[in-house]
Image (cartoon, rainbow, N blue to C red):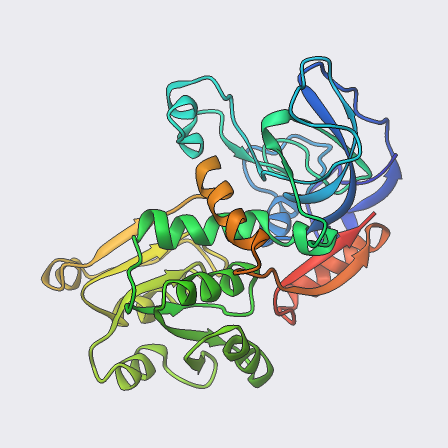
Amino acid sequence: MKAIVFNEFGGPEVLLYRDIPEPKLRQDQVLVRVKACALNHLDLFVRKGIPGINLPHINGSDVAGVVEGVGEYVTGVKTGQRVLLAPMAFCNHCEMCTSGQQNFCREFTVLGYGVDGGNCELIAIPEVNVIKIPDTLGFEEAASVPLVFLTAWHMLVGRSQIKQGQWVLVLGAGSGVGTAAIQIAKMFHANVIATAGDDAKLAKAKELGADYTIDHYKQKISDEVKRITNKRGVDIVFEHVGKATWMESVKSLRPGGTLVTCGATTGPEVGIDLRHLFVKQLSLLGSFMGNMGDLHEVLGHVFARRLKPVVDRTFPLSETAEAHRYLESSQMFGKVVLQP
């Protein structure tokens, strides 16, 4: 089968489109023919080199496709079904997994990070990861859902416990996780302020439901938040940018507010004045992916079309290097998808 493989870390040029052996199906696995695989910033970080990657490696966390075969022990999945894959791997038998907290499993990892992913034509995956999708959801849309909607749902609902009428600041509205966060916050009838770096992205953020927008290149985020909220500040900051926005994010919180973060796209090293933290009684929350319950819950809203994936652009699998360059340019609004 065809796959995108890299044998060394580096720029997009290390991504090789080549033939590799088809996966051998275990008795407890499902063989899926990949129809679409969405990119994430994680793909860029893994390609450049982060701990835990065994080479050669195949990227790709967000997969949608058709079931091509099932192992002898598989009972709930049938050949020919249209599916998406839960973008994670876990042991499925430890205390954390059996209590529904898969993202605390000691073996937990993201598909395409600690294990090979879906930048290929065929992938073998445990049955627990395979989720049937409705015929109304296209493969490109389906592949644009799992990681970002799971992450955003866990951040806002699971960790921050979002409530109706709250003020939510969403950083990076043009990212996949940003587009998901805007929609989830609006579904809870929150007041949403979204940031982006150009007028076109700001307009699209409003189309998704953002009530107010901030150009983070031309305006100071915390000043605009105070102006919009009449000096109140926001209840929740949805942070995933990291170093470049951290202090503005903290300054944007109301007393007692919550900053929840899932990433560090611009760098992991940030600072905080502890006096500011305890005097304002702020909550700083980390969030990593989510659990299977979160995924099934948010997928229910996606399948009912209350939440809609945003596809920016598609590339053939053979042009994955160019897709990486496009993602690194930050031109996109929504998800960049590969098609084998």
The mark tally for this picture is 0
Image: 270 above or below 54: below
Residue at the (53%, 78%) spot, across then down? 197
The image quarter containing residue 231 is bottom left
Residue at the (33%, 64%) spot, across then down? 237
Residue at the (60%, 38%) spot, across then down? 113
| Quadrant including the N terminus | top right
Give left or right: position of 161 versus 298: left
Image: 238 above or below 19: below
Q: Can residue 291 be seen in this view?
A: no
Q: Is residue 264 visible?
A: yes
Give left or right: position of 1 versus 119: right
Give left or right: position of 261 versus 62: left
Give left or right: position of 42 versus 79: left
Pick the front one: 14 or 228: 228
The image quarter containing residue 319 is bottom right
The image position of residue 173, as x and y in percent, is 50, 70
The image position of residue 217, as x and y in percent, is 48, 81
The image position of residue 186, as x and y in percent, is 42, 67
Image: 26 above or below 196: above
Pick the front one: 235 or 188: 188
Pick the front one: 219 or 182: 182
The image position of residue 104, as x and y in percent, is 40, 31
Residue at the (52%, 27%) spot, across then down? 90
